Amino acid sequence: MRKNFGAKPWTYPQPVFIVATYDGEGNPDAMNAAWGGIDYDDQINLCLSAGHKTVKNLLKTKAFTVSMATADQLTACDYVGIVSANDVPDKFFRAGFHAVKSEFVNAPLIEELPMAVECELVSYDPEMCHLVGRIVNVSADERILDEKGKIDPAKLRPISFDPVHNAYLEVGGHVGSAFKDGIALKK
């Protein structure tokens, strides 16, 4: 038997994204965004309301980065989600973050967050709070790469958002092989 909850924004896992921008003077800003994902090979979608300083910045610069929040940086990642840069202009630095200019877009990479998707603005609908970005590059610090030079989730330690309990969960270990394990049912 199932229990019905009605229309809720509940999915698992829900990635925790840290969206970073520069303002008009080149000051970095970051915000926590839990509702978003990839919809094409080269596009990311996020639900961001127009009042955020980060949204105002990216509408001016037409660029942003999306870092994966990590267990190691959980406190800082939560902080940039509960404090507004409209009220605390230096929240990026108060979080303990350090900005490194992206080589590909006019937006900061966050040194403490080792994986980022670097994006150019495609569109933004303020009524729907729907942001679309074109992925220009994905970058990862070498410290989270495996012996084959690929991103190792165990080293990255990304977190997900539990929207039912307002909690952060660490993404778990390997449980199967995509595009392989289901072949057993094709017989």
Image (cartoon, rainbow, N blue to C red):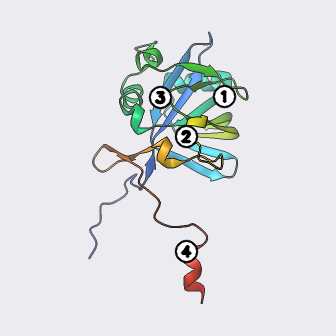
Pointer 1 or 2: first along the chain: 1
Element assignment for label 3: strand
Report how far apart the C-alphas of labels 1 and 2 lie in the structure: 25 Å
Q: In this view, does 7 lie above or below 118?
A: below
Pointer 2 or 3: first along the chain: 3
Name the disc covering residue 31, or none. 3
Element assignment for label 2: helix
Q: Disc 2 marks which residue? A: 144
Kind of residue at badge 1: Ala
Report how far apart the C-alphas of labels 1 and 3 lie in the structure: 14 Å
Q: Residue 56 in the image: x percent, y percent?
A: 56, 23
Mark 4 vs mark 3: give the one in front: 4
Q: Residues within 10 Å of mark 3 (few under 14, many from 20)?
A: many
Mark 2 vs mark 3: give the one in front: 2
Q: Residue 55 in the image: x percent, y percent?
A: 55, 27
**Residues at marks 2 and 3 touching, judged by CB atoms closer than 8 Å:** no
Q: Residues within 10 Å of mark 1 (few under 14, many from 20)?
A: many
Pointer 1 or 3: first along the chain: 3
Kind of residue at badge 4: Asp
Task: Identify the image quadrant of residue 5.
Answer: bottom left
Whether residue 79 sits left or right of residue 121 in the image: it is left
Kind of residue at badge 2: Ile
Instruction: Point out the image quarter for the C terminus.
Output: bottom right
Q: Disc 1 marks which residue? A: 63
Task: Identify the image quadrant of residue 34.
Answer: top left
Mark 1 vs mark 2: give the one in front: 2
Whether residue 67 sits left or right of residue 10 in the image: it is right
Report how far apart the C-alphas of labels 4 and 2 lie in the structure: 26 Å
Report how far apart the C-alphas of labels 2 and 3 lie in the structure: 23 Å
Report how far apart the C-alphas of labels 1 and 4 lie in the structure: 39 Å
